[in-house]
């Protein structure tokens, strides 16, 4: 048995991308466009959370918005690199 086993490639359809932002934020709008495109291509789901409606998100991420989570783990903030997001989703 090989010690150098390849990890099972992630199925993008099993992942969820979360965009944490606020209304009126142009960087959030740009991030959303990238997320919609990449998730649409790969079949991943995504959701949007308003930082102004959640005290905990506000406390944790206010200075970084937009913040992008992949399966609950922080992936990026301010700008979304589509190639990096595709890789994180297994695409």
Image (spheres, rainbow, N blue to C red):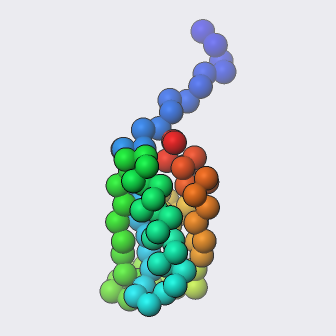
- Say whether residue 56 is left or right of residue 88: left
Provide residue 6's location: percent of width, then percent of height.
59, 25
Q: 56 or 88, which lies in front?
A: 88
On the question of residue 50 being in view, the answer is yes
**Which residue, as the protein is rendered here, is positioned at the far right?**
4
Q: Residue at x 46, y 69 (%)?
A: 33
Provide residue 50's location: percent of width, then percent of height.
37, 81
Q: 91 or 72, which lies in front?
A: 91
On the question of residue 61 being in view, the answer is no
Q: Residue at x 60, y 22 (%)?
A: 5
Identify the image quadrant of residue 18. Answer: bottom left
Q: 70 or 56, which lies in front?
A: 70
- Say whether residue 90 is left or right of residue 1: left
Examine the rendered structure and indicate whether residue 2 appears above or below residue 79.
Answer: above
Provide residue 70's location: percent of width, then percent of height.
47, 57
Q: Which quadrant would the N terminus be assigned to in this image?
A: top right
Q: Residue at x 60, y 75 (%)?
A: 78
Examine the rendered structure and indicate whether residue 43 appears above or below residue 81.
Answer: above
Examine the rendered structure and indicate whether residue 6 appears above or below residue 63.
Answer: above
Identify the image quadrant of residue 4. Answer: top right
Provide residue 37's location: percent of width, then percent of height.
45, 59
Mark count: 0
């Amino acid at each position: 048995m090989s010690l150098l086993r390849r990890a099972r490639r992630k199925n993008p359809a099993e992942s969820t991308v979360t965009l944490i932002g606020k209304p009126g934020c142009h960087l959030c709008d740009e991030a959303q466009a990238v997320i919609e495109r990449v998730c649409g291509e790969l079949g991943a789901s995504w959701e949007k959370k308003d930082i102004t409606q959640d005290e905990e998100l506000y406390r944790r991420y206010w200075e970084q918005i937009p913040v992008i989570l992949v399966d609950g783990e922080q992936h990026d903030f301010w700008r979304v690199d589509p190639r990096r997001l595709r890789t994180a989703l297994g695409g």
